Image: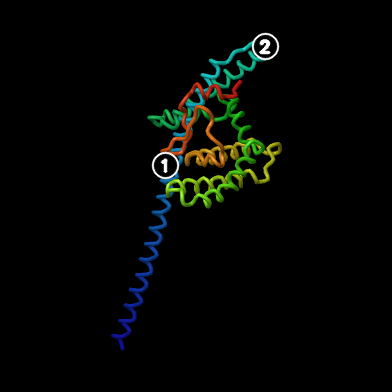
Amino acid sequence: MDGMKEITECKEIIKEDSNQTESSTIKNTDNELDALMEVMDQEATHKAANNFQEMLEALISVEQKALEKATTSSEGEEAEKAEAQQFLKDLVALSENTAKVVRGRSEEEVQQGMAALAPDGKTPIEPLMNVVSTFFSKEMMYPSIKQLYDSFPKYIKEHAEELDGGTRTRYERQINILGKICDEYEKDFDESTSTQEEIGKRFQKLSLLMMQLQSYGYPPEELTGSMPDGWQMDATNGVPKLVDVDKAAEACCLL
């Protein structure tokens, strides 16, 4: 009897140890998955930041060329050109500082860029940030984003046989982010009664979502229309690329 009791106790110990080992394995697997997702998020964020920087530099080239081509014949047009020149100056300042953050070779350089980007009322880019903030307003962005979000799944279904695995995955990720952007715009948010901190947090969240969306490339032309003159979609990553600054400048509605 004592022998049977010992065997039973041994079985229970082995079973308990097995359960603990299995639990530990699952926990380790979950931790490894979380770590992997964090690395992937960091890589996606860095990719998006690099794409944003390249787009910013391309936009500066277009704005500079547009200003060179612009002619003024009245006082009103002179004022508009002066305003455009200031906008370009702010755009260059933004690019210089974001470049430090994205491509900084040292921690000090990155910190300098981040400090310059802080909207503390003293930075040279505050007027530009106001423009960008207006651009991200619900009235400006939500209708087209919502339309794209609603029509995207149908497009994927209708073109399922034509899409390769990579493109389909990229489109599905775009849909996911578009949904998050719509959710943010659909929240009950009144800018007139919100604090600057609340407005800043919302703007930051929308900015990050837009950057994430852009990191997955350009949506299908059938849903968004063709690229503007002077631009084309980079086939390697789906990101808009400047190919002819003169054509882009002619199409630019800066002035």
Q: Residue visible at 53% across and 52% down?
A: 157
| Residue 80 in the image: above or below residue 117 | above
Q: Residue visible at 59% across and 37% down?
A: 203
Q: Is residue 127 left or right of residue 1?
A: right
- Provide the residue designation for mark 1: 43
- Residue 33 position in % (x across, y down): 41, 54
Q: Secondary structure at mark 2?
A: helix
Q: Nearer the viewer, mark 2 or mark 1?
A: 2
Q: Residues within 10 Å of mark 1 (few under 14, many from 20)?
A: few
Q: Residues within 10 Å of mark 2 (few under 14, many from 20)?
A: few
| Residue 233 in the image: above or below residue 72 | below
- Residue 195 position in % (x across, y down): 66, 37
**Image quarter of the C terminus:** top right
Front-lying residue, 17 or 31: 31
Q: Secondary structure at mark 1?
A: helix
Front-lying residue, 72 or 225: 225
Measure the C-alpha gap from mark 2 to mark 1.
49 Å
Precedes in sequence: disc 2 or disc 1: 1
Q: Residue visible at 65% across and 46% down?
A: 187
- Residue 109 position in % (x across, y down): 42, 28
**Image quarter of the N terminus:** bottom left
- Provide the residue designation for mark 2: 75
Colour scheme of the picture? rainbow
Front-lying residue, 254 or 8: 254
- Residue 173 position in % (x across, y down): 49, 47
Q: Amino acid at mark 1?
A: Glu
Q: Amino acid at mark 2?
A: Glu
| Residue 190 in the image: above or below residue 118 | below
Q: Is residue 93 visible?
A: no
